[in-house]
Image (cartoon, grey):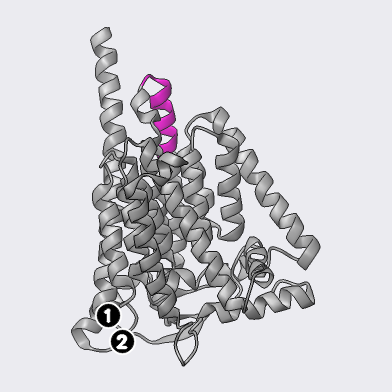
């Protein structure tokens, strides 16, 4: 602890964190005469009151979250001040934990703290949004899980499971574990964590699975990567797409948009199948003697590539999704291999554009192109990595013969 406090870099990080987060809190408006602009936190407060008074998970199209989100939304009721103040304080604490985890990962990686700087300076690029959504929590749980990957399978799985019980995407972190025994332990820990949350929600609030129907009925959100043709048409003709608010977001309407949304479901399943195939070939190559593929850095890169694939094939791309991608980009840049540095920096660039996406077809198009380019680049690099190692292994076998 004494050496930590004597580290000037740590004090610099703390100073920058305090300064940038103060600006984010100021943007919320707690200190303005007009009062805070809490955005979705107002909805969380209403849902928290309903959860506490009616002991039931909210119904309707706006609720699309696993039941772990219900417990998370109740936490600010236990804090100081108003619900909004407690929620922002909880997100600030979560943010600080994420910074500490990235610093720990950087120390393990030989003093590479690029991800720490990305986290410090990248989150404020989203303005106050990270403090007004609960996506920071599963993102930091994902960082924690990736710090523990291969070292502590039970902790890795449990963190991934808790994250998935709040917002489903962290379950794909399990793709990062290649060893079957460790994967079994991790999967059991994840299943146990999810089961505990779901059973507790069933006892406390009733049906914990209602969110599945609402998620399945969503259409093509106007921010999704697949809406680039509509954005390009708007740039050329000046005519925006027909749209309406559904499930709390603007969705493009029409038969073409619905067809694209249906195709995206298959595209996402294809992406998951491709990820499973890559995982299988990697595990086989490692058992064949390719120890360099067993490194944790490969797992971190692979998870980042998988989440990118799922985001670009999703019918929905809410602004807060960038919090997930920024967290994983910070992890990849901290791992220090440089293999997916370019996709990671493309994500940082896309983050810069994200807050100006609304109402701008041009910014939306550039942001989505950056995400698509990052995904293609990351995918090709992971495939070439596996092929190169497999080719090398084949060459070694033939030489020995």
36 relative to 192 in the view: left or right:
left
In what quadrant of the picture does the C terminus appear? top left
How far apart marks 2 and 1 lie (CA) works out to 8 Å
Residue 260 lies in quadrant: bottom left
Q: Nearer the viewer, residue 275 or 185?
A: 185
Mark 2 and mark 1 residues within 8 Å of each other at the beta carbon: yes
Residue 266 point in image, percent of width and height:
45, 58
Q: Nearer the viewer, residue 190 or 315?
A: 190
- The residue sitting at the bottom extreme is 34
Residue 12 lies in quadrant: bottom left
Disc nearest the viewer among 2 and 1: 1
167 relative to 351 in the view: left or right:
right
Residue 281 point in image, percent of width and height:
40, 32
SS state under label 1: helix
Q: Nearer the viewer, residue 384 or 176?
A: 176
Q: Magenta part of the protein: which range?
A: 278-289
Q: Name the residue: 48% across, 74% down.
A: 219
Q: How many marks?
A: 2
Asked if one can make out residue 61 in the rendered structure from this viewpoint, the answer is no
Q: Name the residue: 71% across, 78% down.
A: 49
| Magenta residue check for 284 | yes
Q: Which residue is mark 2?
A: 240
Q: Which residue is mark 1?
A: 361
């Amino acid at each position: 602890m004494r050496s930590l406090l004597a580290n000037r870099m740590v004090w610099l990080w703390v100073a920058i964190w305090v300064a940038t987060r103060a600006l984010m809190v100021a943007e919320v408006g707690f200190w303005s005469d007009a009062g805070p602009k809490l955005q979705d936190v107002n909805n969380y407060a209403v849902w928290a009151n309903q959860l506490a008074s009616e002991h039931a998970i909210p119904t309707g199209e706006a609720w699309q979250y696993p039941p772990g989100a219900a417990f998370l939304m109740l936490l600010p009721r236990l804090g100081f001040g108003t619900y909004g103040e407690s929620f922002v304080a909880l997100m600030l604490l979560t943010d600080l934990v994420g910074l500490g985890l990235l610093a720990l990962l950087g120390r393990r990686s030989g003093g590479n703290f690029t991800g720490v700087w990305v986290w410090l300076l990248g989150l404020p690029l989203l303005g106050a949004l990270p403090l007004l959504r609960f996506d920071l929590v599963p993102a930091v749980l994902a960082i924690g899980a990736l710090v523990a990957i291969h070292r502590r399978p039970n902790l890795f799985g449990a963190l991934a499971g808790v994250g998935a019980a709040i917002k489903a995407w962290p379950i794909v972190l399990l793709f990062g574990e290649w060893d079957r025994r460790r994967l079994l332990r991790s999967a059991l820990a994840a299943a146990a964590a999810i089961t505990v949350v779901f059973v507790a929600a069933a006892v406390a609030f009733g049906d914990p699975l209602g969110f599945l129907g609402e998620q399945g009925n969503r259409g093509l959100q106007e921010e999704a990567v697949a809406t680039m043709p509509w954005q390009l048409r708007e740039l050329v003709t000046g005519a925006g797409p027909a749209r309406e608010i559904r499930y709390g977001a603007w969705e493009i309407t029409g038969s073409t948009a619905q067809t694209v949304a249906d195709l995206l479901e298959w595209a996402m399943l294809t992406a998951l199948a491709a990820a499973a195939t890559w995982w299988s070939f990697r595990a086989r190559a490692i058992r064949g003697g390719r120890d360099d593929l067993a490194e944790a850095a490969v797992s971190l890169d692979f998870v980042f590539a998988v989440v990118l694939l799922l985001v670009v094939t999703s019918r929905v791309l809410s602004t807060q999704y960038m919090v997930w991608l920024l967290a994983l980009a910070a992890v990849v840049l901290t791992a220090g291999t440089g293999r997916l540095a370019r996709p990671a920096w493309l994500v940082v660039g896309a983050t810069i554009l994200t807050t100006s996406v609304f109402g701008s077809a041009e910014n939306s198009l550039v942001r989505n192109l950056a995400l698509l380019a990052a995904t293609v680049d990351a995918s090709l690099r992971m495939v070439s990595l596996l092929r190169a190692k497999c080719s090398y292994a084949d060459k070694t076998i033939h030489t020995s013969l």
